[in-house]
Image (cartoon, grey):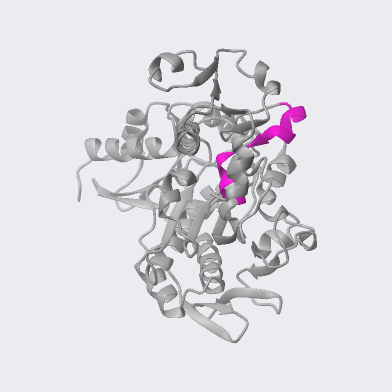
Amino acid sequence: MNKKIIEDLRNKKLVILGFGKEGQSMFHYLRKLFPDKPLSIADSNEQLPGRFSHLKNVVWLTGSNHKLPLERYDLIIKSPGIILPEKLNSKVTSQSDLFLQAFGDQVIGVTGTKGKSTTASLIYHIIQKQTSNTVLVGNIGTPPLEEIEKIDNATLIVNEISAHQLENAKASPSTAIVLNLFEEHLDRFADKSAYYRNKLNILKNQTSTCHAILNDEATMNGDLAPRQSYPGQKWLFAFEHNRQRASWLDRGQIVFRGAAKSETYPLPSGNLPGKHNLLNSMAAIIACRINGIAPASVREGLVSFTGLEHRLEEVGIFSGIRFFNDSISTIPQTTIEAIKTLPDTQTLILGGYDRHINYSILYDFLKQSRVQNLILSGPAGNRIYEEYGDKAPQNIIREDDMKAIVEAAFGCTTKGSTCLLSPAASSYDQYKNFEERGKSFKEWIKKTGTAD
């Protein structure tokens, strides 16, 4: 880590707020830097001091009032998603922010409401076709500081960054990608604008030598406007060509226009289904090319990338029914794109934890779709039923247990048709994350049906 940052941390009274995976990673890194420095840990879980009694020179702040003493500290190193009063903002940082302060010049940062993990993984996969000196960190599951020993001055770092991780960011990556912005996480942010502002922090601290890769469709819709206020060099991508854009579609290929000439790249349609993944691929191509990855490596990576679990993942054909797992879908826009990609969807599974987002565009789409059965679950499913049930042309089934949901899907879906889990809602009503929900869905399909 940058020597100036290390010295700054050495001379400050530090508290780690939140002791989950990222908080623990932060503690172990600080302990390596400062073996004898007193460190404080604040978390609501009163069991932590007993579980981590082996940690030395630690002051524990636990229980319902664990945030009250935070004003005493010079720096609060906060885990993502924890809410603090605005008066403490000047004292707040995060592992993600400290990492960007130290290594931002080497980082390709990826954010957006949807597509972050796929795009970051695709970029990492492409870079590996040319060099092994790369790491993939961040919201995808690996806290950045856990990979720090693999990083030298030439390492290309791919960093998936969430709105929570960008909340108090005081640094930006040299290459920043904003894939899209949709209404999401309204259980955490005051409104859509507050959520967007946190996302766009990825651009705020760039300089004129940095690169901002932006979905121009989002820009035109006003979600990124005014884009002129962001200092990085703009690289715009969209489906249609115009003179300002760096990437677009043309006759079944992706075009990239760099400083010298235009280049063409194959569509990754077999590996990454859906129009949204064409936009993700454009962003990946731009990021790789402006960071020195050769066209041949980019083409090879696009063709060989196999996609990620729980993202329009084909589970298989069971008892004559084709099942797809799109558990990553937590907003209506991604569910709509999933159905457009799989137009023969007969049964759609919706619902989960209710984040109070607006489903009206989904209702309008479903009225015109070929979907015949809706299986609704959780609080979000209840709200969808209340708002849409009386108007729905579909047969509606309400179930909360995944076993019952899958049994209902086998019962109402005809052979030769498709059943799609694309919930348009978070999983937190029953599961710790969307991955656990998707795995449960796949397990019950295999237990209930017969593989064809």
Q: Is residue 67 above or below residue 324?
A: above
Coordinates of residue 172 in the picture (x, y in percent): 65, 54
Coordinates of residue 71 in the picture (x, y in percent): 71, 22
Residue occupying the point 44% across, 38% down: 434
The quadrant in which residue 386 appears is top right
Q: How many marks?
A: 0
Q: Does the magenta portion include 94?
A: yes
Q: Is residue 200 left or right of residue 438?
A: right
Q: Main secondary structure of the magenta part?
A: helix
Residue occupying the point 32% across, 29% down: 403
Q: Is residue 412 above or below residue 76?
A: below
- Closest to the observer, 187 or 50: 50
- Closest to the observer, 42 or 73: 73
Q: Is residue 115 visible?
A: no
Residue occupying the point 60% across, 80% down: 257
Q: Is residue 393 above or below residue 287?
A: above
Q: Is residue 307 left or right of residue 44?
A: left
Residue occupying the point 33% across, 35% down: 440
Q: Which residues are magenta?
A: 85-101
- Closest to the observer, 224 or 47: 47
Q: Is residue 324 left or right of residue 380?
A: left
Coordinates of residue 213 in the picture (x, y in percent): 63, 64
